[in-house]
Amino acid sequence: MATEPAELLTVALGVAREAADLALRMRTDGVTGIDTKSTITDVVTAADKAVEDLVKSSLQQLRPGDAVLGEETGGAAEPSAGGAVRWIVDPIDGTVNYLYGLPQYAVSLAAEVDGVVVAGVVRNPVTGQEWTAVRGGGAWRAGRRLTCSAQRELGLTLIATGFGYDARRRAHQAAVISRVLPRVRDIRRFGAASLDLCLAAEGAVDAYFEKGLAAWDRAAGGLIAEEAGLRVTGLRGEGPGRRFVLAANEAVYEELHDLLVEADADGGP
Ligand code: IPD
């Protein structure tokens, strides 16, 4: 089967739109099947599962043989190799917002070939906003090519971040915030990592960082951010991963990176 990024994006778009419609319908009907996962603050709903099932079965129909990794039902845990495609899906990124009826949640779907994300879409079901990228082809929303912020002064940056669900990790993250907040314009916690990365892609925030993101939280949004000109990495020279994701424009990257290292942002539990 074809593995051209543009074709994979077309598939991703069709599936993500269907998935977003289902998420919205199930929200309008009232949230059901509320349960917790890793801790009492880590929520899952019937909609998370139903949307992931829909994505998986649509992909299986359209592209039998491709591997899929999803937040709720797992699947292909290893990166793709040998020319194979692995899809990475977060059916509802921002489940806590979804539960509370806050509009900041998204369906995130990415296609990875040989371990590299080559196409991705993030769609907000409430606003209909849809961010897309194919590797090397720029990041886009509503027909407009996106460019990240050009802010050069760390003290004038608006920075998005997020927190994990574990109390000890949160205590460490709070300590990191206490080091970063006095040095920047302000910090935002919107509640959906994929959308945070898309906001950085369109310059609505200047940078984003978070510790402990899973592949489904960052795969599509990370590509979109990179394609909009952000440098997307881990800390201390690693690539982005579970320990850390930093997305910042080239002008403030080094200073923010060093501040985060100083604050031990990728340390702690
Ligand atoms: C969460 C959101 C949140 C981020 C957490 C993620 P979920 O994803 O993206 O913004 O801070 O780290 O786990 O659980 O809503 O899919």
Image (tube, rainbow, N blue to C red):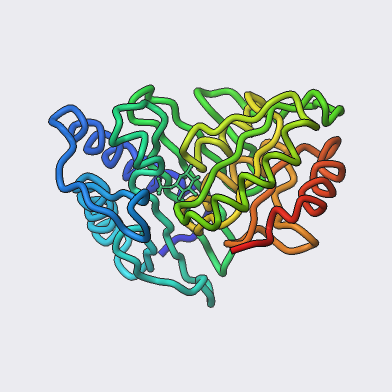
Closer-to-camera residue (142/152) = 152
Estimate the x, y position of residue 22 in percent, counting from the top left. 22, 38
Q: Is residue 98 left or right of residue 50?
A: right
Closer-to-camera residue (237/177) = 177
Q: Splitting the image into 4 quarters, where does residue 182 fall?
A: top right
Q: In this view, does 213 lie to the left or right of 72?
A: right
Q: In this view, does 246 lie to the left or right of 166?
A: right
Q: Is residue 205 above or below residue 213?
A: above
Q: Splitting the image into 4 quarters, where does residue 159 fall?
A: top right
Closer-to-camera residue (145/150) = 150
Say which quadrant the N terminus sits in: bottom left
Estimate the x, y position of residue 38 in percent, counting from the top left. 37, 61
Q: Is residue 206 above or below residue 242?
A: above
Closer-to-camera residue (239/109) = 239
Estimate the x, y position of residue 203 in percent, counting from the top left. 67, 26
Q: Residue at x 58, y 23 (%)?
A: 144
Q: Residue at x 34, y 66 (%)?
A: 74
Q: Residue at x 33, y 48 (%)?
A: 91
Say which quadrant the C terminus sits in: bottom right
Q: Splitting the image into 4 quarters, where does residue 211 fall?
A: bottom right
Estimate the x, y position of residue 59 in percent, counting from the top left. 30, 56
Q: How many labels does the image show?
A: 0
Q: Residue at x 33, y 70 (%)?
A: 65
